[in-house]
Image (cartoon, rainbow, N blue to C red):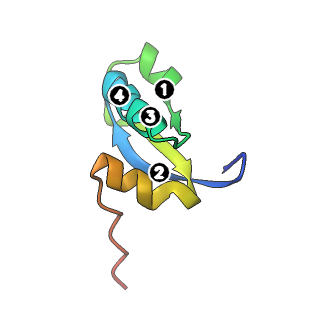
Amino acid sequence: MTGERGPLVTVARFLSPIEAEFARSRLEADGIGSFIQGEGLASILPATPFTEMLLQVRAADEARAREILGEEPPAAPVA
């Protein structure tokens, strides 16, 4: 999937729509556009790992978004 100006990357995962929306609001307050993938499904199904919502931003905004959210980047796979 690509955003308006490049590919999207996941910077956080949530089971709660409220937490996802709060995080999106924090990013947008700092001028970072974001998208919550899975938001619609989570509104009709109870919270389970299958209704996980992904907070996504443009790849160019990833480092700043993680800094704002206090998220660590995913670990590199071990070969």
> Which of 52/4 is in front?
4
* Image: 67 above or below 42: below
- Image disc number at residue 29: 3
Asked if one can make out residue 47 in the rendered structure from this viewpoint, the answer is no
Q: Real-space Cα distance between discs 1 and 2? A: 14 Å
**Which residue was labeled with disc 4?**
22
Q: At label 1, which amino acid type do we have?
A: Glu
Q: Residue at x 72, y 45 (%)?
A: 4
Looking at the image, the residue that sits furthest to the front is 30
Question: Disc 2 marks which amino acid?
Answer: Thr
Q: Is residue 73 visible?
A: yes
Which amino acid, by three-letter code, is at mark 3? Answer: Ala
Identify residue for label 1: 39
Q: Which of the labelled discs sits on residue 53, or is there none?
A: none
Dot in front, 3 or 2: 3
Which of the two marks, 1 or 4, is nearer to us in this view? 4
* The C terminus, quarter of image: bottom left
